[in-house]
């Protein structure tokens, strides 16, 4: 009974924080999906899949990470 009381207390005390974390993780997962899909799908198709009305929003998924850019520079340097 004490354990259930502790769980209930934590849930109601931190419900907003839990919801914020859940929302953030969903956003990260969606962005990662879009980023990975952008490697193999044309931009206009990716926009349709992601439900974007504007390609400007979809372009966020094709921006390279630092690792991507470093890898591209290294590829060029050794070619």
Image (spheres, rainbow, N blue to C red):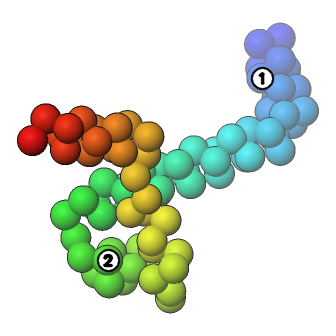
The mark tally for this picture is 2
Between residues 14 and 50, which one lies in front from this camera angle? 50
Q: Is residue 60 above or below residue 21?
A: below
Circle 1 is placed at which residue position? 7
Q: Position of residue 73 (x, y in %)?
A: 28, 42
Label 2 neighbour load within 10 Å: few <14, some 14-19, many 20+ = some
Residue of label 2: 43
Which secondary structure lies at badge 2?
A: helix
Q: Is residue 31 above or below residue 52?
A: above
Q: Give neighbour class at mark 1: few <14, some 14-19, many 20+ (Cα, 10 Å).
A: few
Task: Give residue 74's quadrant in the image.
Answer: top left
Residue 65: image x %, image y %?
Answer: 43, 45
Task: Please tell me in which quadrant of the rendered image residue 12 appears.
Answer: top right
Q: In the image, residue 46 lies at what x, y percent?
A: 33, 75
How far is disc 2 from disc 1 in space, using C-alphas?
46 Å
* Residue 55 image point, x, y percent: 45, 83
Q: Residue at x 64, y 48 (%)?
A: 24
Left-right relation of 29 to 20: left
Does residue 39 lie above or below 73 as drawn? below
Looking at this view, name the residue that lies furthest to the bottom: 53
Viewer-closest of 36 and 51: 36
The residue under the point 50% across, 86% down is 54
Quadrant of the snapshot with the N terminus? top right
Badges 2 and 1: C-beta atoms under 8 Å apart?
no
In terms of sequence position, does the residue under pointer 2 or pointer 1 come before the other? 1
């Amino acid at each position: 009974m004490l354990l259930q009381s502790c769980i209930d207390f934590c849930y109601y005390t931190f419900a907003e924080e839990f919801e914020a974390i859940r929302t953030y993780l969903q956003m990260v997962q969606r962005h990662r999906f879009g980023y990975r899909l952008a490697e193999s799908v044309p931009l206009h198709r990716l926009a349709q899949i992601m439900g974007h009305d504007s390609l400007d929003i979809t372009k966020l998924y094709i921006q390279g990470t630092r690792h991507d850019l470093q890898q591209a520079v290294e590829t060029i340097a050794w070619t």
